[in-house]
Amino acid sequence: MVPVYGAPEGVDALVLVRRWAEHNGPVLHIARDDTRLAGLAEAIAFFGPEVEVIAFPAWDCLPYDRVSPNGAVIAERIAALSRLQSEPGKKRIVLTTVNAALQKVTPRAALSGGGMLLRVGENIAPGELAAFLDADGYNRTATVMEPGEFAMRGGIIDVFPAGDAQPVRLDLFGDTIESIRRFDPETQRSGESVQVLAFHPASEVAFDNNSTARFRTNWREIFGAKA
């Protein structure tokens, strides 16, 4: 791969589109920060509207900070990793930043085993779905407003899947999914119906039983058992 450097802002997007046209596989560009990443994505859409662009931003906080990353940022990162994993050799432009490139990411095995596909007419127990969402990092709330949240009210389950633009409302009759509809998180009004819904993890850290047990074991080894 021949590196590209020294191109002024604005022209670099055109260079990336030309490199994408010449290359048979994905093209990776590392921007200096998230602001420049967003500007590049807009410029690439202007010069090459047919080009698929995947943005992989960095966390909006420092690693090991007391503040967790924003849910929308986590959702965008996981959606990008899932798309790259599903079609690794597809022709596209991948945009990331220096901080994101230096940070460790979720293992491929965690993403491949962390999803769920739901269809209208299929059966799923509400408790089973809630356990899956808990293990995948979704937060249970009274009202779904942001990515990575879910709420349960009897046979109605609202979920804001990671990487989606809108939340969805599942209407269950017993254990059978009768309908899946998108809705506006501000007005809570239902919109278009969908037949298939794919879930991605809402957290880059797994919360399954094995991960929890491993954390507890390592905690005891480092800090000792609770007195």
Image: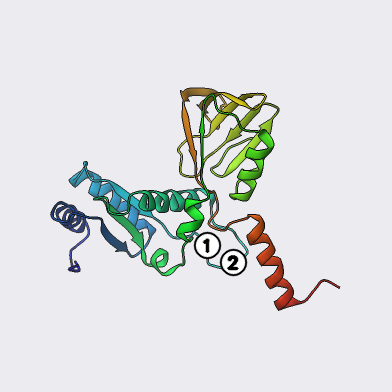
| x then y, percent, for residue 215 | 67, 66
Q: Secondary structure at mark 1?
A: loop
Q: Decide if residue 36 is in sight here.
A: no
Residue 153's tag is none
Establish if 165 lies above or below 97.
above
Compared to residue 222, the image places residue 95 above or below, namely above
Screen quadrant of the C terminus = bottom right
Determine whether, in the image, residue 60 is placed left or right of residue 22: right
Three-letter code for the amino acid on which mark 1 is drawn: Cys
Q: Nearer the viewer, residue 117 or 153?
A: 117
* Residue for badge 2: 65
- As rendered, which of 187 and 218 lies closer to the eye? 218
Q: Quarter of the image holding residue 171?
A: top right
Residue depicted at x 35% and y 59%: 96
Q: Position of residue 179 (x, y in %)?
A: 54, 23
Residue 46, percent from left and from top? 21, 44
Seen in the image, is 148 located left or right of residue 73?
A: right
Q: Which quadrant of the view contains residue 143?
A: top right
Relative depth, front residue between 138 and 14: 138
Q: Secondary structure at mark 2?
A: loop
**Residue on which disc 1 sits:** 61
Direction right: furthest residue: 227
Please tell me which residue is depicted at 30% across the width and 55% down the height of the picture. Answer: 94
Q: Amino acid at mark 2?
A: Asp
Q: Residues within 10 Å of mark 2 (few under 14, many from 20)?
A: few
Q: Could you say which is closer to the camera, residue 44 or residue 215? A: 215
- Is residue 130 among what the camera can see? yes
x, y (%) of residue 108?
Answer: 45, 58
Q: Does the residue at mark 1 contact the one at mark 2 (Cβ under 8 Å)?
A: yes
Q: Is residue 130 above or below residue 221?
A: above
Which residue sits furthest front? 123
Image quarter (top left, top right, bottom left or bottom right) of the N terminus: bottom left
